[in-house]
Image: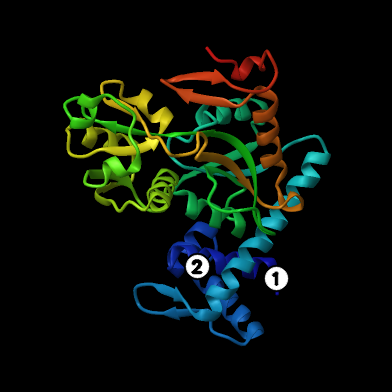
């Protein structure tokens, strides 16, 4: 089995199409097909179900995909480790993040990283925390900034960023706003909720809080971006339970404390593979974050919440 066979297999699995995969790999379609057939002969199992429009993975193909991705990630890490020893950080930094994650200003951090390591190609993917955890564990991402969805495992570890309470957002004319008092989950049982898809960290946190309180709720309006959620609440179409820092994104909305929950119930982390499998680029990014201070995005500004008294010039808050 050759590495190029695995690279070709992963590309076809991602594109679900031989022609598109061949174009991306800059190889001929006949050569790509021959490479996949050679891999299938060696494994003595078909890896794809082929149709005229696309290809899909067989059960054997699905079993191979995760292992192939991990092997290729380890090979990339090996190349990058050698380059790092030679004094030059090269390769690719594949980063994942949820929208508006607390504990780090992703854009500012990546800008500082690029200035320090211009030979590293940065790739960014935005998704829910559950999907991001799976992609880091599978080796498709070097690290991700996400909500803590699970305890550390053999394939995934976490570095804490920050914790914060959940807050209720509603329209200023809503009955909750008129009361102007902190609320508990039981006060919200009959409300119409605006919330994110179940894979998102804030949604997982809110579901957990209400389940622990024994309160049923119905999410009538489900979205996949922060600003649409705020727009719907702003039109008085429902209320939202979100991490506290979201309140600064729409000051016109009324924010109410949600009691009977932990102060740091919403915990965000950096998700990484095991130490031995962490790429040099990912280590450099985490080092930059730790030495420069943990940066929070609040109201469009960068706030230093940890680290040295004076962060490096290139990520110092303005």
Instruction: Quickly name the residue at label 1.
Output: 2
* Towards the viewer: 64 or 269: 269
Residue 90 shows up from this direction: no
Location of residue 93 by image quarter? top right
Count the numbered circles shown. 2
- In percent of width and height, residue 304 lies at 58, 19
Which residue in the rendered view is the most extreme toward the right? 85
In which quadrant will I find the N terminus?
bottom right
> Would you say 198 lies left or right of 117 here?
left
Element at label 1: loop
* Vertical order, 170 against 198 (above or below): above
The residue sitting at 53% across, 74% down in the picture is: 62
Identify which residue is drawn at 48% across, 25% down: 297
Distance Cα–Cα, label 1 vs label 2? 16 Å
Residue 12 numbered mark, or none? 2
Please determine whether, in this image, residue 17 is positioned above or below residue 24: below
Instruction: Decide which of tag 1 and tag 2 comes sooner along the chain.
Output: 1
Residue 267 in sight: yes
Residue drawn at point x = 64 percent, y = 38 percent: 120
Q: Nearer the viewer, residue 99 or 245?
A: 245
Residue 134 placement (x, y as % from top left): 54, 57
Residue 289 occupies quadrant: top right
* Residue 275 locus on image (x, y percent): 74, 49
* For residue 174, side relative to residue 130 (left or right): left
């Amino acid at each position: 089995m050759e590495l190029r066979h695995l690279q070709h297999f992963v590309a076809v699995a991602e594109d679900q199409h031989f022609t598109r995969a061949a174009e991306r790999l800059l190889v001929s379609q006949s050569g790509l097909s021959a490479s996949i057939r050679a891999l299938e002969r060696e494994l003595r199992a078909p890896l794809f179900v082929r149709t005229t429009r696309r290809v899909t993975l067989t059960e054997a193909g699905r079993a191979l995909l995760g292992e192939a991705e991990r092997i290729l990630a380890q090979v990339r890490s090996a190349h990058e480790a050698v380059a790092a020893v030679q004094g030059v950080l090269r390769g690719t930094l594949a980063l994942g993040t949820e929208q508006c994650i607390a504990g780090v200003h992703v854009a500012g951090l990546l800008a500082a990283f690029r200035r320090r390591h211009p030979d590293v190609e940065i790739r960014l993917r935005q998704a829910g925390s559950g999907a991001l955890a799976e992609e880091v564990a599978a080796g498709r991402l070097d690290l991700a900034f996400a909500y803590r969805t699970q305890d550390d495992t053999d394939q995934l570890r976490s570095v804490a960023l920050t914790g914060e309470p959940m807050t209720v957002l509603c329209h200023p004319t809503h009955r909750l706003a008129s009361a102007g008092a902190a609320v508990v989950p039981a006060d919200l049982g009959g409300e119409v909720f605006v919330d994110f898809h179940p894979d998102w960290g804030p949604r997982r946190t809110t579901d957990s809080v209400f389940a622990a309180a024994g309160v049923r709720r119905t999410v009538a309006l489900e979205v996949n971006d922060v600003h649409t959620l705020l727009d719907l609440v702003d039109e008085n179409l429902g209320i939202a339970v979100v991490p506290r820092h979201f309140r600064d994104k729409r000051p016109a909305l009324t924010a109410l404390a949600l009691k009977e929950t932990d102060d740091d119930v919403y915990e965000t982390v950096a998700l990484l593979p095991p130490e031995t499998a962490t790429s040099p680029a990912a280590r450099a990014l985490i080092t930059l974050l730790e030495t420069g201070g943990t940066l929070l995005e609040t109201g469009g500004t960068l706030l230093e919440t940890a680290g040295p008294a004076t962060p490096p010039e290139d990520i110092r808050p303005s």
